[in-house]
Image (cartoon, coloured by chain):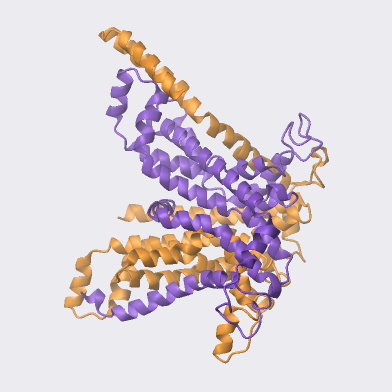
Amino acid sequence: MVNALVPETAERAARRPPSAGRAVDGVGRTRRRQVVVAYLFLAPTLLFFAVFLILPLGFALLLSMSRWAGFDLGDIHPVGLDNFTGLFADGSTFLAPILTNTLLFALGTVALALTGSVLVATCIDKLRFQGLWRTLYFLPIVTTVVAVGNVWKYMYEPGGLVNGVLNALGIGSVAFLQDPDTALPAVVVVQAWASVGSAILILTAGLKSVPESYYEAAALDGAGPVTVFFRITLPLLRPSLLFVCITQFLTGLQSFALIIVMTKGGPGDATDVAALEMYRQAFSYGDWGTASAAAFVLFVVVLVVTLLQLWIFRRKGEDT
Amino acid sequence: MNRRRFPWLSYLLVVTGAVLTVVPFLDMVMTSFKGPGEAGTLPYRFLPKAFDLSNYRAAIHQLDLPVLFRNSVIATGVITASVLLTSSLAGYALAKLRFPGRDFVFRLVLSTMMFPPFLFFIPHFLILVHWPLAGGNDLFGRGGAGLTVSIVALAMPFLVNGFGIFLMRQFMVSIPDEILEAARIDGAGEFSLWWRIVVPQTKPVVVTLGLLTFVDAWNEYIWALLVSTADPDVMTLPVGVQLLQDYVDPTRTMPIVMAGLVLSILPVLILFLLLQKYYIRGVMLSGLK
């Protein structure tokens, strides 16, 4: 089809004499043809957005304000904001521990991943074989959550690697994922472990933009490495740090695949997070209404953080 | 100069971090070679007594690995091909064609990146259940299972990607208009302009986007879980391996699970190691992962 088009149009062009009047006419025709072609090129995309973006958003909003048992479309009953008030009613576990867990999970992964990536990124910058190190740190990112979750789950077992190391140090085994006190921190470590690689990448890009002359000036003034790190590297890295911080926080708020694989929200509800609760209400209990309401509440939290991010970076852009 | 004052400290930190990153992978591989009763028992041993290949045979046998592999390849292939095609076509229209509504469509594309994926799991699932004239459904989407429990469903919600369109558009904007105008004056149609001039010039971004899409699609778990748990015939590798994990006794069959995991991550790892420059560029461009 592609090749068939070319000789045909080329031939038509050859037949057209190069006169001024015709050229104007040709421009008009090209314009009109562009409109048709543009919408032809966009047709699959627009059709997809209609069916898999706009329709679902409307459907989810409708569901969040309905009670619906099962799959028959005729059984949807509007209930107003009941699903939302139900989430925040007395005795509901949504606010605590579920939303609290979600925030702790997101904050914990940001804190760990940021600390780790700042340390490693500033150190890698001084070493040889930078590509090799970055590749190694990147491996978890290209690995399926099923593999990451299961390996760590196994490593946390009493006979697994983590406890093996603890035992070698003379510390008794800890049942990390079975103990409500340690389960959430244990999952946070895995999420941070998996996201350090991309943070290192973004921070390295930020480090590369710090002028070498700053370090040379600091060296002339006799500044030690610690002073250089806190007085030069960290302040100049602030935009990249902020970016990593917010994007990782957003990812953390939405994560639940790792938790499904590792703990399924347990023990009890020690690792239950909002997206997982939405998933379970929908696909374990068939309560589409509550699930959709939970999804929208989480969406509002995510949206606020996203808008905050846009606002911060727009302001940063105006400053400079 | 000052930056290189304590390289040994930097090496110590970076190497420790790298060891912490790689050790879980090594543990996965080592465990996959352990014999029965050798994994998950005290005291912990890192190395297997003998490199036992039988776990791989068991994993392939218990998982029906060829079917899982086929499903993963089909779903991933269809998603990647579709994302590349639709992103390139839409990106070209948004970057190089003039038409009413262009700004609106571009804003729509940008806005799709703001919606988190979890918002769509429920409506997408229900839309596929009620897909008209599929899986025993009537014209109004009633009566059957629709498109769920089908290999089509694995790929459908991922066929178009707003970020992909955005990436293509940004890249195509920098192609000089003069080249396209010259070809237009020579009488070339827009479709051949796209295919003969624009597509060849966008090869690097095609590889980048293709790789990002491939890795994401191959590793997708939640959606694949939703549409395939009822039917082993449409399961993907991550779903199949996880299912095996759910039903086994950890101390006895852990090596088999680890063998399955190694096999399931091998294709992406190889692809990543070969084309990591493109993948890393993609992650830096998206900055989201």
Determine whether A201 is above or below B220 in the image: below
Whether residue B157 is visible: yes
Of A272 and B128, the residue lying toward us? B128
Q: Quadrant of residue A180?
A: bottom right
Q: Where does residue B233 sit, x and y in percent of width and height?
A: 71, 47
Residue at 25 percent across and 74 percent down: it is: B3
Of B283 and B35, the residue lying toward us? B35
Identify the chain drawn in orange.
A
- The count of marks equals 0
Q: Quadrant of the N terminus of chain B?
A: bottom left
Residue at 50 percent across and 35 percent down: it is: B86
Of A213 and A166, the residue lying toward us? A166
Q: In the figure, is residue A6 to the left or right of A187?
A: left
Residue at 69 percent across and 45 percent down: it is: B125
Residue furthest bottom as drawn: A170
Determine whether B107 is above or below A208 in the image: above
Q: Quadrant of residue B254?
A: bottom right
Residue at 62 percent across and 54 percent down: it is: B237
Q: Where does residue B244 sit, x and y in percent of width and height?
A: 70, 62
Determine whether A317 is above or below B87 in the image: below
Whether residue A256 is visible: no
Q: Quadrant of residue B132?
A: top right
Q: Where does residue A5 sit, x and y in percent of width and height?
A: 42, 19
Q: Where does residue B257 sit, x and y in percent of width and height?
A: 65, 66
Q: In the figure, is residue B209 to the left or right of B53?
A: left
Identify the chain drawn in purple.
B
